[in-house]
Image: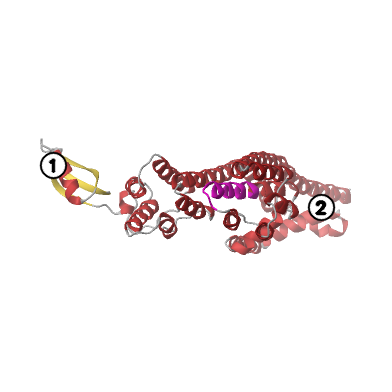
Amino acid sequence: MARYRFKAFSADGHLQEGEIVAGSEREAARTLERRGLSVVSLAQPDPAAARGAPPGLRRRRLRTGDLVIALHELATLLASGVGLAEAVASQAASAHDPRLLEAFEGMSKALRRGLSFSEALEGSRLPLPPYVPILVRSGEKSGRLGSALQDAVGQMEYDQQVRTEIRQALTYPAVLVAAGLGAVLMMFTFVVPRFASLLDRADDLPWLGWAVLTTGMAAREYWWVLVLCLALAGGWLARQLGNAATRASWYEWLERLPVIGVWRVEAETASWSRVLGTLLRNRVSLLDALDLARASVHSPGRRTRLDEVARNVRAGAALATSLEEQATLTPTGYNLIRVGERSGELPTMLNSLARLCQDAGRARMKQFLALLEPLAILLIGSAIGVIMIGIILAITSANDIVV
């Protein structure tokens, strides 16, 4: 199925324009003729122009929300019994983002060439988390592709929800910090220089007053150095964030912090448990599932410990015992997995562990973000207070000298 842009005259002579979905251009023309329209032009629209984007204009970045919605719709179609080829073709006809349209059309063509859906999905180059192709591949092997895709979409929705909550919670502290830095900059630019003459009596000024006045004058005279340092720091940070190895080491460092560390561990545990549980539910062997599930973990140290767990399980050790020896999970996680192994309901226990960790992680995240606001107020207030005290000390010292 494809979209066709048409122009046609109605029976009363009015020109009509619109789009129609059909299997071929001939089928689209026949459908329009059955509606009583005389076709003037019929062609497939340019993907960018169809969405209101001028030809040659660089397309915007694909939003995660649009990708999640598209995959959720695809998973719903598959779970409803719609054939894979038909479901993908339907998404290609209804996609609103040019990149999604191009991706689903490419997947549809790949399926017609005989490729599997996992191969077509990886060839689409969509920005997917590493666990999505793994879950899709396991669903193909077990014949439960729709269920596996729904699980992958559920994890993506959770990740997106966490990111949204973090952005919303950080908005006010970020505005507060920006306003505070602006106030400090204004004081250094316009207020402090008015008292620069007091530096002529530097020997008689209190240390804090001298430091504030000297810093203000230096910032005003060498502002370009500050701008250059900020630009270099921003470029360095962007480069480090683009390096996968650096991001992994930062994840490792975050896990050692007091509040954020526990939150990161719970988030990693939730992702690993959900992926492992889905793989086992799709009849993937435990050893293969352990090797595949480690792709959902970001911390290099945790990945190393999970590799050791897989080796111990391969040697005949119980999963819960191996995880406990490597200090990989929480005591609750060990107990749930031990119960799952004994009862034969390990996938169910892993999903329960994922939900518990997700809820606990969200609570810790809100607790941490709630501390940012008073901390930002304290830091900005302290900086402004130090500047004001330094200026007041300098003024009062100068008055004492005059007297």
Apparent side of residue 128 relative to residue 263 in the rendered image (left or right) = left
Q: Nearer the viewer, residue 104 or 335?
A: 335
Q: How is the image coloured?
A: secondary structure
Query: Label 2 belongs to which residue?
Result: 209
Q: Nearer the viewer, residue 13 or 39?
A: 39
Q: Which mark is residue 112?
A: none
Q: Residues within 10 Å of mark 1 (few under 14, many from 20)?
A: some
Q: Secondary structure at mark 2?
A: helix
Q: Which mark is residue 33?
A: 1
Q: Is residue 199 visible?
A: yes
Toward which corner of the image does residue 376 lie, by quadrant?
top right
Q: Nearer the viewer, residue 55 or 217?
A: 55
Apparent side of residue 93 relative to residue 234 in the rendered image (left or right) = left
Q: Residues within 10 Å of mark 2 (few under 14, many from 20)?
A: many
Query: What's the residue at 61%, 42% (across, down)?
Result: 345
Query: What's the residue at 71%, 54% (across, down)?
Result: 322
The verdict on residue 273 being magenta is yes
Apparent side of residue 303 relative to residue 5 in the rendered image (left or right) = right
Q: x, y percentage for residue 88?
A: 36, 49
Q: x, y percentage for residue 153?
A: 49, 45
Q: x, y percentage for residue 31?
A: 17, 42
The verdict on residue 326 being magenta is no
Query: What's the residue at 69%, 45% (across, down)?
Result: 338
Residue 328 in the image: above or below residue 365:
below
Toward which corner of the image does residue 342 lie, by quadrant?
top right
Extent of the magenta region: 268-284
Q: Nearer the viewer, mark 1 or mark 2?
A: 1
- Mark earlier in primary sequence (1, 2): 1
- Disc 2 residue type? Gly
- Disc 1 residue type? Glu
Q: Secondary structure at mark 1?
A: helix
**Mark pair 1, 2: CA separation:** 86 Å
